[in-house]
Image: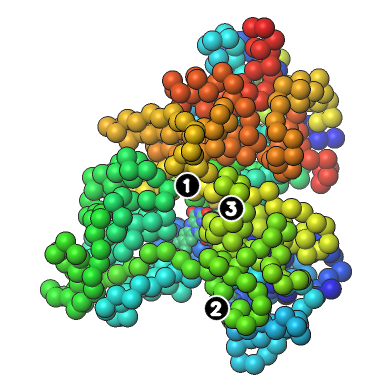
Amino acid sequence: MRHVIIGAGPAGVVAAETLRKLDPDSNVTMLSHEPEPPYSRMAIPYYLVEQVGEQGTWLRKGDGYFENNGITVRTGVKAEGLDTQAKQVKLAGGDTVPYDKLLIATGSHPIVPPLPGVDREGVHTCWTLEDSRHIIERAKEGSRVVLIGAGFIGCIILESLVMRKTRLTVIEQQNRMVPRMMDDRAGGLIKKWCQDKGVTVHTSTTVESIDEGGDGHPLAVRMDNGESAQADLVIVCVGVKANTAFLEGSGVKADQGILVDRHLQTSVEDVYAAGDVAQGLDFNTGEYTVQAIQPTAADHGRLAANNMAGYPLKHQGSVNMNVLDTLGLISTSFGMWMGVDGGDSAELYDGDRFRYINLQFKDDVLVGGSSLGMTDHVGVMRGLIQSKVRLGKWKERLKNDPTRIMEAYIACTQAIGHNARVLSA
Amino acid sequence: MLKALKLEPEKCTGCLQCEMACSFENTGAFNPAKSRIKVFTFHDEGRFAPYTCTQCDEAWCMHACPVEAIVLNMATGSKDVLSDVCVGCKVCTIACPFGTVNYEADSGKVVKCDLCGGDPWCAKACPTGAITYVAADDTGMERMRAWAQQAPREAGAHANPPKAKEVQVFNVPQQGGL
Ligand SMILES: Cc1cc2nc3c(=O)[nH]c(=O)nc-3n(C[C@H](O)[C@H](O)[C@H](O)COP(=O)(O)OP(=O)(O)OC[C@H]3O[C@@H](n4cnc5c(N)ncnc54)[C@H](O)[C@@H]3O)c2cc1C
Ligand code: SF4
């Protein structure tokens, strides 16, 4: 059996390892467009501040790890087409790679908006190690950097840019930072926190063009509020789009991402998709969406590989979740943090101390939550959401004090709750 | 034979000796805030419950880590954080559905229970036997049943939810041991 995986991010690597385990006699080949060994984009912020070297970003670090585990990695090769009749991947340069089962794990690429001047020198996205090298070169101490977009990825690298001692301006079109992860109030707190730390933040502001700069700075970013910010480096972080272009004409159907069923198989038999490129099942909504987060990519990779190896496993849906550290202010969000129809919520807001927690319920089950300024036991929100634990009387207690979430979990799942119930019965 | 931590909250008096011992062993100072085992207080019921990592088979934290900084300790079955590899991204802290991997701002890394390499200090410090380190198969079957009975859920709603190990008994995988 020839298993071919296009893409060497977490989805591809976890799938390759799982295939080797479940189907030891098979051939596993992983193709990556990028020249580096399989690495994690999530480690880029730490690479940017030189906390880790390039090797620190590698997904697997052992010497000859892939070779020793019977996984062939071909880097620097780009899939340009797919012939699902002949079961071949077409590579740039004309080569073909035949497969019996194929996994598409090509991830996504950053969107570059059609702004006047966006192609000027010194304007970069921040998605690959290659991008990072350009950024390191320009983001020198005291240099002026403009970050366009304060979504999740933008906010993650914001911290790296500040730690590089640049003079940073952030411009976000929506009314708050991380709009898809935090509500108005929490997003507002993050903005205030950043401003207190010396970052210039413009929200509800659109960039109109990237012009030639002055005063020794090559660039100037013009905004719709009439202001203009000088820059030595402009980083564009306005969102990502699934890498599906090479599937044109292959019969593999895609919408936001590649359409998959609950076995992560695409519209074409023996072709599977996983990770950022796949439009997979969301645990909370029951809908198929592109989540574009690392834990989901790893989940997808493992599941798809099981199905490819002939051990059918149905995807139960992934919980959308994020954790973000903005200059020391840590925020998390899980599932339906924005709430659901007919549900209710518990909230605690302490703006002066930059603390916030919000829990969302449907009946007495937790369906979402978000937090700011909390680092202890946050994962339990995921646990309560995904195991659909009935909170019973603990729901009222949480409405009075949502910070007691860990106690609620222990009481509702462990013997303490059981004993207590027996005692109070 | 692999061993596991067994926690019996009904024996816990809330004296916090375990938190003291854990923080001292792991940080060199008596500082319950730095303990990897936590005693939760239930004022309404007048009860206490010590709780820490279950060293679960699924190891959600380990699978979520982007840089292989959490590894299986073959000798004890614990999942250990390699702090020199950890970049502090915190993804493991949201991936762990039991809330037992926590981020520490001063080190910029995460910490979790590693069974003290096979000689857990919390168990040695507990004066009431609420925390013991026992053979992994000496698990609290009765508690497990109690948990199964008291947790009604929609049938078939989810075939793959995060599974806590049987109540209070911290299991370790049977395979891969000594
Ligand atoms: C700076 C940064 C920080 C991030 N931080 C977080 C975070 O904190 N938490 C989180 O959950 N997520 C984070 N993410 C997102 C996370 O990295 C992605 O969700 C994850 O990488 C998706 O994994 P994947 O395997 O699907 O795709 P990718 O990791 O994108 O891998 C795709 C692979 O496919 C290859 N490829 C693409 N097209 C082709 C082609 N045509 N032919 C051959 N190969 C191809 C690429 O070279 C690459 O090897 C971050 C991303 C960035 C950029
Ligand atoms: S915080 Fe450290 S151990 Fe946890 S996932 Fe990130 S790198 Fe891995």
Distance in Å between CA atoms under marks 3 and 1? 22 Å
Answer yes or no: is residue A28 visible: no
Between A244 and A44, the residue placed more toward the observer is: A244
Give the left or right position of residue A110, taking residue B20 as reference.
Answer: left
Q: What element carries label 3?
A: loop
Q: Is residue A262 visible?
A: yes
Q: In the image, what residue occupies the spot 31% across and 64% down?
A: A148
Give the percent coordinates (x, y) of residue A395. 53, 23
Check residue A287 in the rendering and tell me which mark sits there, or answer none: 3
- Residue appearing at x 44%, y 28% in the figure: A346
**What residue is shown with label 1?**
A323
Q: Which residue extends farthest front?
A: A342
As shown in the figure, which amino acid type bears the numbered disc 3? Glu
Q: Where is residue B96 in the image (x, y as percent from the top left)?
A: 60, 41
Classify mark 1 as within 8 Å of ligand 1 or not, answering yes or no. yes
Looking at the rendered structure, whether the residues under marks 2 and 3 are on a common chain is answered as yes
Is the C-beta separation of discs 2 and 3 under 8 Å? no
Rendered image: mark on residue A245? 2
